Amino acid sequence: MREILRKALEKIRPGEAEIREVEGIAREAEVRIGRFLPRGVRTMPTGSVVKGTFLAGEGDVDLFALFPHSYSKGLMFEEVKGAVGKAYPKAKMEVAYAEHPYVKFMLRGKKVDVVPAYLMEEGGRVKSAVDRSQLHTKYVVGRMGDGQEDEVRLLKRFLKANGLYGAEIKTLGFSGYLCELLVIAHGDFEGVLRAASGWKGRVAIDLEGHHKDCGAVLGRFPEGFVVVDPVDAERNVAAPVSAGNFERFVRVCGRFLEKPSLKFFFPGKMKDAGIAKWIAGRNIYGIEFANEKVVDDVLWGQIRRVNAAFGVFLEQSGFTVLGAHPYSDGEKSVLFLEVKENELPKEKEMRGPLLKMKGDCGKFRAKHRGAKFVEKEGRLFAIEKRKWRDFAGAFKEYAKKGFVPSHLGGLREGRVLSGKGLIRFKEGLEEYIRYR
């Protein structure tokens, strides 16, 4: 294992030249933009560059502009936007959105995010979610021991390679801050994996002992995986991690410990022939449709909702859903679904009321006029011929009447992909195969 981790670190640890370059960009941006911010507003670089946990080639700069609480969120943004425009008049500036808008631009090949926030002191009142970032940076820098930066890098790369890195709605995985806290809690990358491979049921980690014990932590938070924020006792850093991703993390940790390999950090791309072989004999389909261009969190929130809704529809129709995976390249989306049945029986049986409920039985018969009726287990059942029996028929029915979110109207004109047609969206299909 040590040799595998050494080789992985050689690829993911930035060199001294890259570190100096990124730190120089951060200092330059802080000084130049700071000159154009109002008096009393502080600047503070935050994130993985300051913590020393960024991966080679990924050193983006996060610069916070910290305002007194007398400023409104709207005014903070306008001041930041104006300061960036004056400091870098030739830069192509974009407005992005978290809880409130911020500014991003490119500086010598690196992305710089300039985020307005309220100046925070420990224990102070949080007015917006981004306010905590300044405290997170101070905490990690103060608590992380020598060499633990590389352990965080290993964990980040391990999660990225297995589709588990990122707290956004698209991924529902582990944030960089959560990675740092797990390494602080368990010492190193191997310690995190050995602990995680044994996780069962609900898990609680409270680094600063904000709560009495694990039972108190689990009683306070509803999620199954809880990592109490060291700087905010009422926040679960692991809240974005979905139950499915938590379980998959536990499994992949166990597999790596059992048989360590660089493939867990750098998985090779699957060849078309390998994908085709995997598909053969499986009832896997894709629903391709155009989506509106909206911010990722909105898009992925709606994709996940409709993916779940269609899965429920399939189950209610008689299919057994074996797996599902949504995918989008920003313009087109695909819902990958695998079902057990290639074709449903010609007839379907619908459960009716108890026989002793005469009035309800009469209504049930009227509703299913033309059906065959049988009585069993003290209940009335209707047996009707199906209008459709395959996956394509199910989607056609859902597209007419099923739930479709506001920005995914293209789903109603979507088309079903199968077999080799699925390989057109190879990246999404490969994700489904790898992340099942």
Image: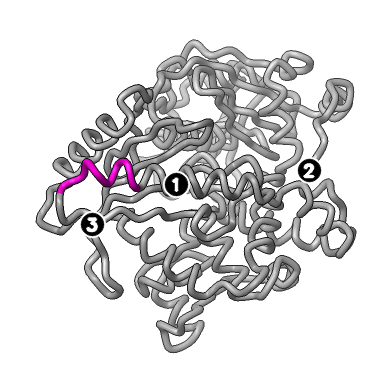
Seen in the picture, residue 157 relative to 236 is either above or below; the reply is above
Between marks 2 and 1, how big is the CA–CA gap? 29 Å
Q: Which mark is residue 26?
A: 1
Between marks 1 and 3, how big is the CA–CA gap? 20 Å
Query: Amino acid type of disc 3?
Result: Tyr
* Residue that appears at 60% across and 16% down: 393
Lower sequence index among marks 2 and 1: 1
* Residue that appears at 41% across and 70% down: 221
Query: Amino acid type of disc 2?
Result: Phe
- Quarter residue 345 falls in: top right
Q: Which mark is residue 266?
A: 2
Between marks 2 and 3, how big is the CA–CA gap? 39 Å
Q: Horizontal and vertical percent for residue 3?
A: 89, 60
- Image-based side of 61 in relation to 186, left or right: left
* Depth order, front residue of 55/180: 55
Query: Amino acid type of disc 1?
Result: Ala
Which SS class for mark 3?
A: strand
Closest to the camera, between mark 2 and mark 3, is 3
Tell how many labels. Answer: 3
Instruction: Give the residue number, with chain letter if any, for mark 3.
Output: 118
Crowd around label 2: few <14 · some 14–19 · many ≥20 (10 Å): some
* Residue that appears at 45% across and 19% down: 291
- Quarter residue 182 falls in: bottom right
Seen in the picture, residue 146 relative to 351 is either above or below; the reply is below
Lower sequence index among marks 1 and 3: 1
Seen in the picture, residue 90 relative to 326 is either above or below; the reply is above
Residue numbers of the magenta segment:
31-38
Task: Specify the farthest residue to the bottom.
Answer: 212
Crowd around label 1: few <14 · some 14–19 · many ≥20 (10 Å): many
Crowd around label 3: few <14 · some 14–19 · many ≥20 (10 Å): many
* Depth order, front residue of 142/181: 142
